[in-house]
Image: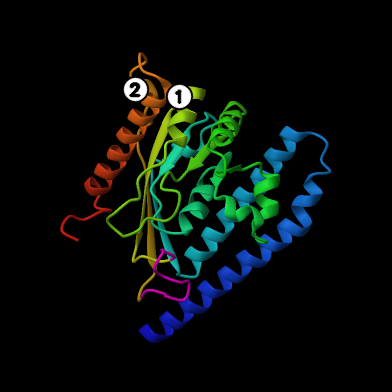
């Protein structure tokens, strides 16, 4: 029976990946180019964002229904408010993006520059007006504009998936500059996947012996004024904010049991 369940989850995972890839290509090649014909830019972005949110909600629901994954969310109401914030999360698995977009109706992401040429993503990231990380200055400017428009910015300050289950990459400072410039609160989010899947070391076919459990804990928002000295320069203030948020998230990963000492 255990063997049959494993084979079923392997097939279901492969089908989900195929659906994601095919839908991404179709959206990029057909749906999202048509969105550019929409004359009103703000409503076009809202419509595209709603489509992306709905698609990922459906995909997460299907993965849970077929027994591939389980999802536990605490504090998720903070992601559904219409008040803009900067979501800063750790990044253990590739699925983090999908899960957070499924939970956040009005979301804009900072996306790796490499994805702007990916056939599964290029139309999506452009039509949704996501922000590239290629230019640090433009990242802050573009992110601030999205916050002013009422969108929640989703940022993984590690820049890529975490190097190990109990270790993070050093946080980049883009989110801190953005928070200081826009005066927007930071919403720390803890991500965990047990057993690990879609990590730096694991491919999609490395299916675990049981359904993996994604846990999302949304912490209390943090105002940048709590973390920086207004008498310092913006660069020093951003450094202070980055260090404080990185320490805050790391400590809570241990407190919540997402990280374990001695491993």
Q: Secondary structure at mark 1?
A: helix
Local packing at callout 1 (Cα closer than 10 Å; few below 14, some 14-19, many 20+) is many
The color scheme shown is: rainbow
* Residue designated by label 2: 228
Front-most of residues 238 and 50? 238
Establish if 46 lies above or below 30: above
Q: Could you tell which of marks 2 and 1 lies nearer the N-terminus?
A: 1
Q: Looking at the image, which is closer to me, 4 or 97?
A: 97
- Secondary structure mostly seen in magenta is loop
| For residue 129, side relative to residue 199 (left or right) | right
Cα–Cα gap, marks 2 and 1: 9 Å
Q: Residue furthest left?
A: 262
Which residue shows up at 41% across the image and 48% down it? 158
Identify which residue is drawn at 33% across, 29% down: 240
Is residue 1 visible in the rendered structure shown here?
A: no
Q: Quadrant of the C terminus?
A: bottom left
- Give me the residue at 61% from left, 29% from top: 145
Mark 2 packing: few (<14 Cα in 10 Å), some, or many (20+)?
A: many
Q: Nearer the viewer, residue 183 or 74?
A: 183
Q: Quadrant of residue 77?
A: top left
Camera-nearest residue between 50 and 239: 239
Which residues make up the magenta segment?
198-208
* Residue 69 badge: none
Query: Would residue 93 be counted in the magenta stretch?
Result: no
Examine the rendered structure and indicate whether residue 63 appears above or below residue 167. below
Q: Which residue is mark 1?
A: 180
Q: Secondary structure at mark 2?
A: loop
Say whether marks 2 and 1 touch (CB < 8 Å). Answer: yes
Q: At which x and y percent is residue 62?
A: 54, 64
């Amino acid at each position: 029976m255990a063997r049959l369940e494993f084979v079923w989850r392997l097939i279901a995972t492969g089908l989900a990946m195929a659906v994601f890839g095919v839908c991404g290509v179709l959206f990029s090649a057909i749906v999202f180019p048509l969105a550019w014909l929409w004359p009103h830019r703000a409503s076009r972005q809202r419509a595209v964002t709603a489509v992306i949110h709905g698609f990922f909600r459906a995909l997460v629901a299907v993965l849970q229904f077929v027994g591939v994954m389980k999802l536990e969310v605490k504090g998720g109401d903070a992601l559904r408010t219409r008040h803009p914030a900067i979501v800063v999360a750790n990044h253990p698995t590739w699925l983090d993006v999908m899960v957070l977009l499924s939970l956040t109706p009005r979301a804009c992401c900072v996306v790796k520059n490499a994805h702007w040429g990916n056939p599964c993503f290029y139309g999506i990231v452009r039509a949704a007006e996501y922000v590239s990380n290629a230019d640090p200055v433009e990242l802050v400017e573009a992110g601030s504009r999205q916050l002013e428009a009422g969108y929640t910015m989703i940022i993984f300050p590690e820049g890529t998936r975490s190097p190990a289950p109990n270790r993070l990459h050093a946080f980049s400072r883009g989110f801190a500059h953005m928070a200081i410039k826009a005066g927007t609160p930071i919403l720390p989010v803890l991500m965990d996947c047990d057993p690990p899947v879609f990590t730096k070391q694991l491919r999609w076919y490395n299916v675990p012996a049981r359904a993996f459990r994604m846990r999302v804990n949304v912490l209390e928002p943090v105002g940048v004024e709590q973390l920086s000295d207004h008498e310092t320069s913006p660069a020093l203030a951003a450094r202070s904010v980055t260090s404080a948020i990185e320490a805050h998230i790391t400590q809570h990963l241990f407190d919540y049991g997402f990280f374990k000492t001695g491993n």
